[in-house]
Image: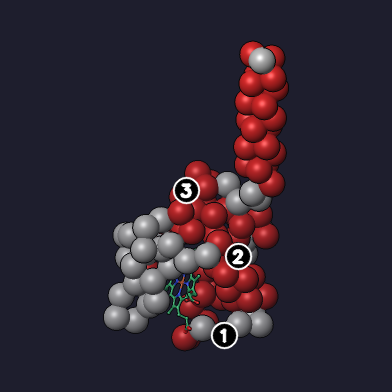
Amino acid sequence: MMTRILMIASAILLLFFAGNVQAKGNIERGADLSYDCVDCHGMEGKGTFETPPIAGLEEAYILKQLRGFSSGKKKSMDDMMHTYTEDRTDQELQDLAAYWATKKK
Ligand code: HEC
């Protein structure tokens, strides 16, 4: 009985860690990369009268938007978002998306 519980417990743990590895964005690195973002989107990413909120959006949605801005496919007012994403690696965009998705709306 005990071994069975242990086996189930370790299977759950394994799934948990596998899930974490699968999430590609690194939240801590995303936080480090976000010092520019807060200038425009506000300290908590809640947006201002000229910028949309970015905190608490779906990670996949943020990533899609950032990739769009970075490649220039998606336009933003005065190309602002292109300027702040064009020199970033895709990994950095994933980190940023992971970080902002964890913030409270
Ligand atoms: C110079 C000001 C400025 C900076 C710096 C900036 N943004 Fe933006 N961002 C904007 C503006 C303006 C928009 C609205 C774009 C539009 O539709 O015209 C926007 C839009 C976005 C969107 C799309 C939101 C939506 O609802 O679709 C995301 C995501 C985003 N920014 C994330 C970021 C991240 C992450 C950073 C830091 C790397 C950042 N922004 C830095 C001004 C800025």
Q: Where is 63 relative to 3, above or below?
A: below
Is ligand 1 closer than 8 angstroms to the Cβ of mark 1? yes
Q: Residue at x 43, y 68 (%)?
A: 54
Judge from the rendering whether residue 11 lies leftward or rightward of residue 104; answer left or right: right
Q: Residue at x 67, y 60 (%)?
A: 90
Q: Residue at x 63, y 76 (%)?
A: 68
| Amino acid identity at mark 3 | Asp
Q: Earlier in the sequence, mark 1 or mark 3?
A: 3
Q: Position of residue 29 (x, y in %)?
A: 53, 46
Marks 1,3: beta carbons within 8 A? no
Residue 32: mark in rendering? 3
Separation (CA) of disc 1 from disc 3: 25 Å
| Amino acid identity at mark 2 | Ala
Is ligand 1 closer than 8 angstroms to the Cβ of mark 3? no
| Amino acid identity at mark 1 | Lys
Q: Residues within 10 Å of mark 3 (few under 14, many from 20)?
A: few
Where disc 3 sits, the SS reads: helix
Query: Mark 2 sits on what residue?
Result: 60
Answer whether residue 25 is visible to the viewer in this image.
yes
Where disc 2 sits, the SS reads: helix
Q: Position of residue 65 (x, y in %)?
A: 58, 73
